[in-house]
Image: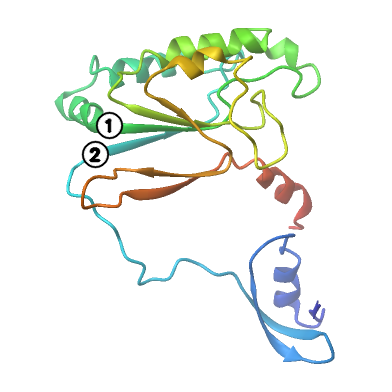
Amino acid sequence: KVIISKTKKELYLAAKDVVPDEVIGIFGTSADKVIFGENIVWPDIPPDHELKKGEDEEYVIFLSDIHVGSKLFLKEEFNRFLRWINGNTGNESQRDVAKKVKYIIIAGDLVDGVGIYPAQEEELEIQTIEGQYAEFTRLIEQIPLDKHIIMCPGNHDMVYLAEPQPVFYQQFAPGLFNLPNVTLVTNPAIVNVGKKEGFSGFDILLYHGYSFDYYVANVES
């Protein structure tokens, strides 16, 4: 147990931002099974952390919250992205970047889902979850096969809501399981990209971030 005195106003306000399961450090004075807190430390990446560099120039694209099926889905913008990743639009430099993209990571909410919130059906262009995933698959299969696509679910996807979430349910999104350049992972997940002989690649923490809604609702401002 840690006791933070209200007389230490700045420290007391900082303590109110602590949420369950958060990793923190406490400076204080120890008494009988209690620490009287004097400072709170949120650990960060150390400044001398080694910066890894691969020999090859490769690119990773990070996407999320595409929400196919919603009337608010950015259809034209996504189609413009598809034209670019296929090398059909942009100047010479932009096309060169598209050619060097090796990985596309999509961090959840591929579709808008059904029954996620009250009256959602009024905002849906595609009313069924199967139809939404079929349309998403139709779009994503237009990405060139030399781009490795890695996808995890989010809270709008048709999977178990509590985290950690499993991979997508095949009965609702069978097309995703048939794409040869797609890897489906849990949420959260750690994935490795850029691994080659003599180089260990880069580890990436992939997380949709739905639990941040809990923090927003519970941390006092």
Mark 1 crowdedness (10 Å alpha carbons): few <14, some 14-19, many ≥20 = some
Q: Is residue 7 left or right of residue 10?
A: right
Viewer-side residue, 165 vs 106? 165
Which circle marks residue 58 in the picture? 2
Q: Residue at x 74, y 24 (%)?
A: 116
Mark 2 crowdedness (10 Å alpha carbons): few <14, some 14-19, many ≥20 = some
Tag 1's secondary structure? strand
Report x, y in % for residue 35. 77, 85
Split into 4 quadrants, where in the image is the C terminus?
A: bottom right
Q: Is residue 40 above or below residue 161?
A: below
Tag 2's secondary structure? loop
Task: Check contact, mark 2 vs mark 1: CB within 8 A.
Answer: yes
Report x, y in % for residue 205. 48, 48
Distance Cα–Cα, label 2 vs label 1: 6 Å
Viewer-side residue, 80 vs 108? 108
Instruction: Identify residue for label 1.
Output: 101
